[in-house]
Image: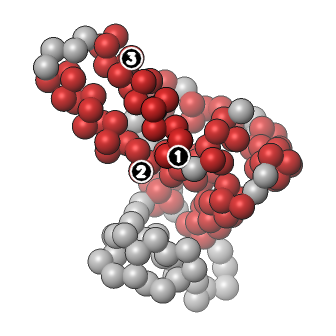
Amino acid sequence: MNTDDVQKIIPKTEPCGSFLCPSDGICKNVDISTTVLNSCHYYDLAMSASNVLLSIGNNIDFVDILLAPVTKQEYWSKCFERRHVWNQIRPSWYEAILNLISPLLPTISYIVINAVKTGASMYQAMSIILASFSQFLECTNPALTKIAF
């Protein structure tokens, strides 16, 4: 199985009833009837564990449970490199962290697109993005600021 199969999202139109099913059309429910785990299972387990940890964990949990194993990996920071931003190949822990900010992205994208359409420069667009994130910071999950620090 290649990495594209691991990242593939299986859209569902109705809730599957599985543990942590978001019921929003992006369910990644994989077959759990097999006795041998494949890479999809490990990805989903790591992402689910990261989501639970980010939801109920504290600073000590973040450092001990999430950050310690991540930073022990040799190329853990590769997903932050600029040339890898758009390829959607993300580790499960990083995808879980990005899910904390995803509710704000449509609103911020709409604001920036309208600004660019009315003649905003790239510098102004970046300023608008930063200002939008700072204004909406109170609306984000508190775990995002904890993990960022």
Q: Position of residue 96 (x, y in %)?
A: 58, 53
| Numbered tag placed on residue 79 in the rendering | none
Q: Left or right of 133: which side holds 75?
A: right
Q: Amino acid at mark 3?
A: Ser
Q: In the picture shown, does residue 115 fall above or below 71? A: above
Q: Is residue 55 left or right of residue 27?
A: right
Mark 1: give few (<14), some (14-19) or many (20+) Cα within 10 Å. Answer: some
Image quadrant in which the C terminus is located: top right
Residue marked by disc 1: 140
What residue is disc 2 on?
Answer: 103
Give residue 27's quadrant in the image.
bottom left
Do residues under tags 2 and 1 come within 8 Å of each other at their CB atoms? yes
Mark 1: which secondary structure?
loop
Instruction: Give the residue displayed 69% in from the left and 41% down from the top.
Output: 147
Amino acid type indicated by mark 1: Thr
Q: How far apart are the alpha carbons under marks 1 and 3? A: 19 Å
Q: Give the labeled residue for mark 3.
A: 127
Between 35 and 143, the one nearer to me in the picture: 143
Label 3 SS: helix
Q: Amino acid type of disc 2?
A: Pro
Residue shown at the point (67%, 64%) measured from the top left? 52
Q: Relative to 7, is 75 above or below? A: above
Q: Residue at x 46, y 71 (%)?
A: 22
Residue 22 appears in the rendering: yes
